[in-house]
Image: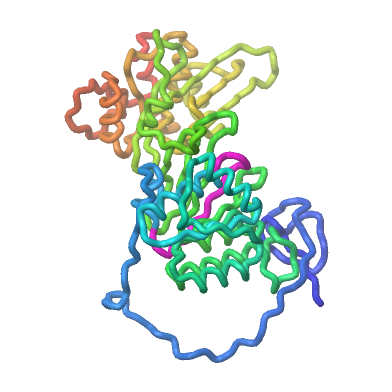
Amino acid sequence: MKTVYVCQSCGHSTGRWVGKCIACDNWDTIVEEIAVKTGKRSISAPILIKTLSGSEIITPSRFLTGIEELDRVFGGGIVQGASILIGGEPGIGKSTLLLRIAANVVQLSSFECLYVSGEESLEQVSLRAKRLKINEPKIKLLSTVSLTDVVATIKENKSIKFLVIDSIQTMYDSRITSAPGTVTQVRTCAHELTILAKQYGVSLLIVGHITKDGQIAGPKTLEHMVDTVLYFEGENSNQYRILRTIKNRFGPANEIGVFEMSEAGLVPVDNPSSLFLMAHEREVVGSAVFAGIEGSRPILMEVQALIAGTNMATPRRAVVGWDINRLAMIIAVLNARCKMFLHDKEVYLNIAGGLKIQEPSADLAVAASLISSIVNLPLPTSSIICGEVALSGEIRNISHADLRLKEAQKLGFKKAIMPKNGNYSSHDIEIIKLGHVRELREVFNYN
C-alpha cells in the first residue's frame, strides 16, 4: 500500500511530507493519502463520431425555476444535464436556496428531484421545508455520504432529472481510502457525478464549502469540471444576499441576482438599484452615485468617501467593496493632476449596501467622492457619475452608457456626469461631459 502526500489547496502530490507546498506556496496543507491504483487501459468498442452540423446532435433544453432573479443568473433557466456548483459562507442560505429551487422546479415540470444531504439528517431537512412551507411529494430525500448510493438511486429511478448534492465535501467514494473532503475524494466524486449527469440528462446542483480566503474548498479542477460556478455573497448580519455567476458555459458570466433573507426564505429583490441607494433629505458631502453594470443589468450604487486628518507617519487607507490598489491610483492622479494632496490624510472609501465593484468605470465616481470630501462640497443634486480615469487624468469612454442613463432616468435622476467623447442617445437627462479629471472642480464650483 503506497502513500502519497497531497496538497489540499491545489492537489499537488509529493513523496514526503513538507510544511509548505512547492506548487501553491500554502503552508500546512499537505495531507497523507493512500495512492489510487490505476488499472491497465483496455481496448474499448469503436467510438461513435458525430459531425458538428449533423441533425443527430440535439440542443439541450432549458427549464425555468419560477424565480426571475435565478433564471437571470443561470442565463435564461437551467440547462438539462448541466452541472452547477454553488459556494458561499456558512449560514448564508445555500441549503435554503437549493430547497426552494427544487420545489419550484418540480412544480413547473413533470420530473422528480433527489435532494442528497450529507451534512443534515432527513428530520433537519424536513424542518427547513416546513419553515419554508414546502410540501412536494416529487422531492425525494436521501441522507447519505456514499457516492455509490447516489449513483445507484439515479440509475434505478429514471424519473429523477434534478439532483442536489449538499455538499460535495461530504461525499465519499469507497474505492478511495482517503477521508471525505480531501482533494482526491472531492475530485473523484465531482467527476463521477458530472459524468452521471451528462449520461442520464440529470441537472446537477452541488454545494461547495469555501476556505477562509473565500475560495471554494478542494482542487481548482472542481470549478473546471462543472458548467456553472455561482458564489453567494453577503454578510450574515445583513439580510441581503447576492448570487453571482463566476463561470457559465450556457450564459453570460458575472451576472448577479439579489435576494432578501426573510422568514419565508430567500425572496428576490425586483429593483436592486433602489435597495443600494439611500434617500437623503439633503445633499451629502463625500457621496456620489455610480451607475454600474453587473453582467447585463445596470445598478445604481452609492460611493462614499471620507478624508480625515491624522498624526500617524503613514496615513491609513481603508476600502470596502473596491480595489485598494485602484484607490491608490486615483489618489496619485488627484495629487499629480489636480494638486489635491492627500499624503498626510487618512482616506476611507465605502460602497454602500455591501456590493463589490470590479469595473474601471467607477474611477470617476470615486474621484468625485474624494474631491467632494476634500473641498467639503456636495455633488449636484440628483446626479449620477461614471467614467474611467487614466493615469494622465483623462476620462475614457465606458461601455453600455445608454443602459446606465436609462436606469438613472427611471429612478428620477436629472443629471449625468459622463466622459466627453462618448456617444449618447437622446434622453430626458442632462449630460455633463468631462474630458479630464481636473474638470470635476468646476462641477463643484470650486477654484
Question: Quadrant location of residue 301?
Answer: top left
Residue 421: in magenta span: no
412 lies above or below 41: above
Q: Position of residue 122 (x, y in %)?
A: 62, 53
Question: Quadrant location of residue 238?
Answer: top right
Q: Residue at x 52, y 89 (%)?
A: 44
Residue 85: in magenta span: yes
Quadrant containing the N terminus is bottom right
Does residue 109 appear to the left or right of 357 in the view shown? left
221 lies above or below 119: below
Question: Quadrant location of residue 173?
Answer: bottom right
Q: Nearer the viewer, residue 223 or 168?
A: 168
Quadrant containing the C terminus is top left
Residues in magenta, as a range? 79-93
Q: Residue at x 64, y 20 (%)?
A: 315
Q: Nearer the viewer, residue 308 or 242?
A: 242
Q: Position of residue 72 (x, y in %)?
A: 36, 46
Q: Nearer the viewer, residue 358 or 130?
A: 130
